[in-house]
Structure formats: C-alpha cells, structure tokens
C-alpha cells in the first residue's frame, strides 16, 4: 500500500523535482525522488520480515560521548553475490529487493537494520538509555555499477535537494537535534553493499563533532565579527594555493589543516548553516563542485578512491546561524596503493599525522585530467 500514489512537486524545490511517499510491506517508509513524475511498476517488493530493533546508548564518561549498541545489525546483509543486490530495483523473476522498478532517480528508505529508531523502547539496564533517532538509506542511482560522480548535474542537484528535504522532515519529528548525511565508498572503509548509496543518521542529541563546530564558529564570530565560513573562503581565495575548484557560488578546498592527505572540503561561498537555506543556483553550484571533486579524486591515481564523505549542517534543535555548512571528503589513499590507517596518535590522542602539505595535495588535484 502507498501513502501517496501521486507525484507531488516539493514545495521548497524547483518545480521539476518530484517525490512520492510509500509504506513498504514491513511498515518502513520509502520516498522516491525524480526529475520527472514518479511511476512504479507493480506492487512494492517485500524483502523479508520486520527486524526487531532495540538500539540503546551508553555514556562514555571520559570522552563525554554516547556509544550506540544495536545487536540486530550483526545479521545485516554483507557483500552479497552479484545476482542479489538489495539496493537494485526488483526485477521479474529475481530476488525481492528494497526498491520497486519504475521511473525515479533517487530513493530514500528506513534502514532495515538501524542503529537508532524514533520508537526505541526504554531499556531495563540503568546504564543505558533508549537509542532514539533515525537511520535512512539514500540510493543514488538505479545503476548498480555506477558512482555518485556518474550522476548528471541535474541528478546531483536533486541529491542536494533530497538531503535538504530529509533534514527538514527529520527536524519536524520533534525528536531530532542533529542530522548527518554521509557516504562510505569502498570495501576499504567497510562498505557491505557496492551499489552507490549513502546513509543519513539523525540523533536526539548533538554529537561531539558538531558540538565542537558550533563552539568554534561562535568563538570566531565573537572574535572577528563575521561568520567563519565567510572569512575562510575569502582567505583561501586570496591565498590561491589550496583552492581546487572555484565555481563562484561554491568552492572546493584542501583545507590548511587537512588531516587526510587529499582531504577536500566543498562549501557554498555565502555563509549558510543548512542546505535548506541555499537557493536553487547555490544548490546547483554545490552539486557541480561536489561532482568535480569526486571525479578528481578518482582520476588522481586512476582507481576508484575509497573515501568517507560527510555533510555537515547545523544542529536542528535551535538556530545556529554561524555554523558553517560544508561537505568533508576523507580519501583513504595517501599514495597509489597506500592506505591511510588511523594508528596510535590518531586513535589514542585524536591528533592526526599527515604525510603531505595541503598546498601540494591541492596542486595535484588541480592538475588531474578530467
């Protein structure tokens, strides 16, 4: 059964963007997004029985952070054979998957094996509290062999719209304080499904990284009187040694404090705290600059670069106008065939050791042939 069989234009998006909301047979939510009206073929597939998710959180008193426990995730799908791809559209005579066949570009559905749920029960153990939050899967394409960077510019812009829409929806639940969209790419970083996809984790608290970003941005405002992102973009444009691609309304930079060898940040050039604050032209510029960055990383050594990409937006618990909206990409190859492993100083002290100055890394990325 579907919640909405019709394709409706998203009110905050360009008119050519469409969405359709459905309820999967096991009760999970599914939203299909497209540049054309959404059409599906047949009934929604039933991939299996509902999973009894009872995630909990435990507080780490010395690091001042929560640790998630979700024992049911041990049974999640792990590197299945090529003939069974749970993220591909279901085909006649094939295994049932998470998605129907039809006309759409991107899909978002509730993770079948979530680390957090909006209705997590209160645990009996006094050391624990309910793992309240939400985990969603974002399927970038129906093409199982493609890459995120293979999307057209229009589809990349649609993805920015989708991330903005999911953040707005999750904030509207009243239970979410922070939303993180991310992509793990490559078995080197623990990917269990090769189909191009990302995830969204929504937390009922502000995680430590975002909390420190809020504090840092507010401290910069108090010192300089301007938003950190405004000053950072101006300084990097003036220095002109770490900018990889300047698209006018969006820019990519190997930051002067990069922890990974080819770490690249993609950001709007106008200070904003949430994707929903960007206008259509700014979202498209961000999408095109993100695509340019990913293509450069793959071209750098002639292989698909394993990476972690994180989309940093302000917490949604209250306005945080100085939070710098940006995307961070952590490539895991520091040289051809050489992985960056987090070792003693990174894991034990939280301080990174980088083999190459950001200026040299940016020069190499600018020099690749696309």
Image (cartoon, rainbow, N blue to C red):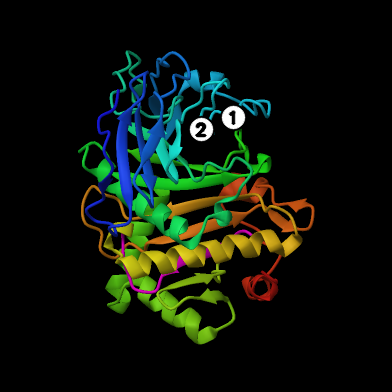
Image quadrant for the C terminus? Answer: bottom right
Label 2 CA crowd tier, 10 Å (few <14, some 14–19, many 20+): many
Image quadrant for the N terminus? Answer: top left
Badge nearest the viewer, 1 or 2? 2
Residue 96 % position (x, y): 51, 21
The magenta segment: 259-274
Residue placed most toward the observer, 349 or 277:
277
Which residue position holds label 2? 89
Q: Can residue 205 be seen?
A: no
Q: Can residue 321 be seen?
A: yes
Residue 71 % position (x, y): 49, 19
Which residue position holds label 1? 85
Give the secondary structure at mark 1.
Answer: loop
Vertical comparison of 353 with 229: above or below: above
Label 1 CA crowd tier, 10 Å (few <14, some 14–19, many 20+): many
Tell me which residue sits at (46%, 31%) in the image: 99
Q: Is residue 213 left or right of residue 242?
A: left
Residue 271 falls within the magenta-colored stretch = yes
């Amino acid at each position: 059964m579907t919640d909405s069989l019709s394709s409706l234009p998203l009110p905050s998006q360009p008119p050519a963007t469409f969405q359709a909301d459905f309820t999967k047979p096991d009760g999970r939510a599914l939203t299909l997004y497209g540049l054309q009206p959404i059409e599906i073929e047949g009934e929604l597939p039933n991939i299996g029985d509902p999973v009894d998710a009872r995630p909990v959180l435990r507080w780490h008193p010395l690091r001042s952070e929560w640790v998630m426990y979700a024992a049911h995730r041990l049974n999640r799908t792990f590197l299945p054979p090529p003939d069974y791809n749970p993220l591909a559209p279901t085909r006649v005579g094939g295994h049932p998957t998470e998605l129907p066949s039809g006309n759409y570009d991107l899909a978002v559905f509730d993770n079948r094996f979530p680390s957090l749920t909006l209705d997590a029960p209160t645990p009996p153990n006094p050391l624990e509290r309910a793992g309240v939050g939400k985990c969603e899967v974002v399927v970038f394409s129906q093409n199982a062999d493609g890459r995120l960077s293979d999307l057209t510019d229009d589809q990349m812009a649609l993805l920015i719209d989708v991330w903005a829409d999911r953040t707005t929806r999750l904030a509207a639940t009243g239970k979410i304080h922070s939303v993180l969209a991310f992509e793990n790419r490559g078995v080197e970083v623990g990917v269990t499904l090769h189909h191009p996809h990302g995830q969204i984790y929504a937390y009922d608290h502000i995680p430590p990284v975002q909390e420190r970003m809020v504090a840092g941005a507010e401290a910069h405002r108090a010192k300089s009187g301007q938003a950190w992102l405004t000053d950072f973009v101006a300084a990097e444009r003036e220095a002109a040694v770490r900018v990889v691609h300047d698209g006018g309304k969006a820019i990519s930079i190997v930051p002067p404090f990069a922890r990974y060898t080819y770490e690249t940040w993609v950001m709007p050039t106008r200070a904003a705290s949430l994707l929903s604050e960007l206008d259509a032209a700014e979202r498209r510029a961000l999408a095109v600059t993100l695509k340019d960055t990913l293509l450069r990383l793959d071209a750098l050594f002639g292989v698909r670069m394993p990476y972690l990409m994180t989309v940093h937006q302000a917490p949604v618990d209250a306005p945080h106008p100085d939070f710098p909206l940006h995307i961070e990409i952590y490539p895991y190859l520091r040289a051809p065939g050489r992985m960056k492993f987090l070792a003693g100083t990174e894991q034990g002290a939280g301080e990174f050791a980088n083999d190459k100055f950001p200026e040299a890394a940016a020069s190499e990325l600018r020099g690749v042939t696309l």
